Image (cartoon, rainbow, N blue to C red):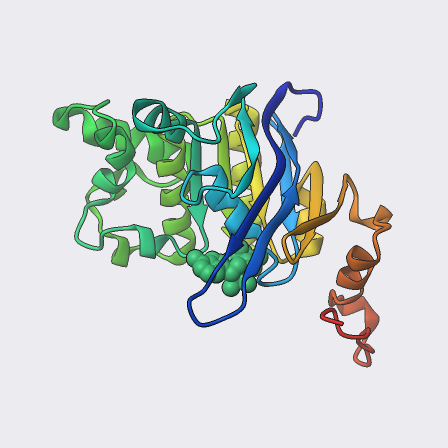
Amino acid sequence: MRLDGKELLRTEDICLTFHPEDGIPVKAADHVSITIHEGETFGLVGESGSGKSTLARILTHIHQPDSGKVYFEGKDVTNLKGKALRESRRAIQMVFQDPSSAFNPKERIADIICEPLMNFGLIASKDIDKKAAEMLKKVDLPEDFINRYPSELSGGQRQRIAIARALVLKPKLIICDEATSALDMSVQKTIIELLSRLQKETGVAYLFICHDLALANLFCDTIAVMKKGVIHETIHDLNEAKAPYSRKLLACTFTIREGKNKVFPESLFA
Ligand SMILES: Nc1ncnc2c1ncn2[C@@H]1O[C@H](COP(=O)(O)OP(=O)(O)OP(=O)(O)O)[C@@H](O)[C@H]1O
């Protein structure tokens, strides 16, 4: 965790409106400006549908914004095409909530981990098992997992495989989109500890998209609070949140210390 790193990624006034065929337009990104520094963990919180994944998809070039700019290491990468786009995709990797959906169930773990290297033509077939074993070690899994299949692993182990695969290209930024949300509390803790350790070892930055405000506050150096495509506040500690929406969101968090008669605040959607 560090806040003194150089600027790694910056968005400037990013806007994107979806136009579903049978509905009203949805402003999923409304003048979004964020800055992520090298080695930083940047949290993105907000209710479901607030535009968190859309922003992730813009940063990974899955969606093109209607307007605004994305800068990576100081370069404008908003409209990259061809080879430049491919190269840029190496630097930002993603880890999703359900890694199984991104894994081919018929592929060995070794091939799953090394797939990004294969896609970029960066590894020979004969080196795959060795590289995969090295990556398994990094994420605290036994090296003989190379010959297993995804269905033979637990959810937490599969998430470690997803992290190993995200790391194999040595990215500068990993976007964790609800990466720990489907895991039980104890496994979630070990994955967070793993992400922390890997960050110390590699200097990778994280964009950590999360519904759990307590976890985001604990793990993230900086947190942006998003609602309906708008960033309402960017702060380092949610306890110091000032924006009315952030306060409402915080008031909705459960804590076991409050006992059994918690009164919910007025609707977030008002
Ligand atoms: N491809 C699309 N076409 C039309 N509308 C979309 C598309 N993708 C997202 N949206 C809409 O944009 C808004 C933001 O969605 P997004 O998935 O970014 O939210 P989110 O904050 O990531 O939600 P969650 O926390 O539930 O994953 C939602 O209203 C969603 O329905």
Q: Residue at x 67, y 40 (%)?
A: 220
Q: In screen coordinates, is 191 left or right of 44?
A: left
User: Is residue 248 or residue 25 the one in the foreground?
Assistant: 25
Q: Say how many tags the image has.
A: 0
Would residue 180 be seen by someone viewing this image from the given angle? no
Image quadrant where residue 27 sits? bottom right
Picture quarter with the C terminus: bottom right
Image quadrant where residue 94 sits? top left
Q: In screen coordinates, is 156 left or right of 112?
A: right
* Residue, far bottom: 261
Residue 245 point in image, percent of width and height = 78, 59
User: Is residue 26 or residue 150 the one in the foreground?
Assistant: 26
Picture quarter with the N terminus: top right
Would residue 173 be seen by someone viewing this image from the given angle? yes
Residue 175 point in image, percent of width and height = 50, 41
Q: Residue at x 40, y 28 (%)?
A: 80
Q: Residue at x 25, y 44 (%)?
A: 109
* Residue, far left: 126
Examine the rendered structure and indicate whether residue 24 appears above or below residue 222: below
Q: Residue at x 81, y 77 (%)?
A: 262
Residue 139 point in image, percent of width and height = 42, 37
Residue 182 point in image, percent of width and height = 49, 61
User: Is residue 196 or residue 34 the one in the foreground?
Assistant: 34
